Image (cartoon, rainbow, N blue to C red):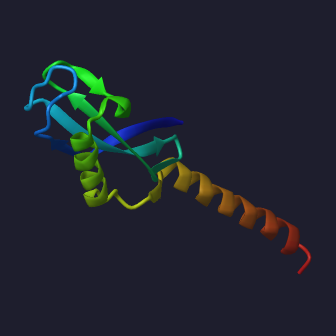
């Protein structure tokens, strides 16, 4: 089973980077968890966000955020709407399910039809 986070929304911020003090490089990325196996695909309700500076190539963790950055991130978290959780069966799951139903019907036919 493969679990990964897909990017839903990316926002460029005009705040100063706490590392390099540049005002052009901060990007806030919102991601949502995506699970894929051989039988199904699923988008979960688990979300995460990440603040990165593209100028100095560093990830800015919440302990380094200034009050201005915290306010802007809080605003964007309120405005962020994740995708609805979904669950989709793949072709192999449908084939397995249909073959199981056919097998059960054949077994029931073998058991009950000779007695009639």
On screen, residue 73 versus residue 5, left or right, reads left
Task: Residue at 14% x, 37% y: name it.
Answer: 15
Report the front residue among 53 and 109. 53
Residue 96 picture location, percent across and down:
60, 52
Q: Residue at x 22, y 48 (%)?
A: 72
Quadrant in the picture for residue 102:
bottom right
Q: Nearer the viewer, residue 72 or 43?
A: 72
Instruction: Specify the farthest residue to the right.
Output: 115
Residue farthest to the front, as pictured = 67
Question: x, y (%) of residue 66?
Answer: 26, 36
Image spot of residue 115 (x, y percent): 92, 76
Camera-side residue: 113 or 89?
Answer: 89
Image quarter where the C terminus lies is: bottom right
Quadrant location of residue 57?
Answer: top left
* Depth check, front residue: 9 or 58: 58
Percent coordinates x, y for residue 18 in the rendering = 22, 26
Instruction: Classify 48 as above or below 74.
Output: above
Which residue is drawn at the image coordinates 13% and 24% (left, top)?
21
- Image-based side of 45 in relation to 114, left or right: left
In the image, taking residue 7 as reference, residue 106 lies left or right, namely right
Q: How many marks?
A: 0
Q: Outermost residue toward the bottom?
A: 116
On-image quarter of the N terminus: top right
Vertical placement of residue 73 versus 79, above or below: above
Residue depicted at 53% across the width and 46% down the height: 39
Quarter holding residue 45? bottom left
């Amino acid at each position: 089973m493969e679990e990964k986070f897909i990017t839903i929304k990316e926002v460029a911020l005009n705040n100063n980077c706490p590392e390099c003090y540049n005002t052009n490089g901060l990007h806030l990325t919102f991601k949502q968890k995506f699970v894929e196996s051989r039988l199904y695909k699923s988008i979960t309700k688990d979300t995460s966000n990440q603040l990165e500076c593209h100028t100095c190539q560093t990830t800015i963790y919440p302990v380094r955020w200034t009050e201005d950055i915290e306010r802007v991130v809080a605003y964007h978290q309120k405005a962020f709407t994740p995708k609805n959780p979904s669950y989709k069966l793949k072709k192999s799951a449908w084939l397995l399910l249909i073959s199981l139903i056919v097998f059960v019907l054949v077994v029931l036919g073998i058991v009950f039809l000779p007695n009639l």
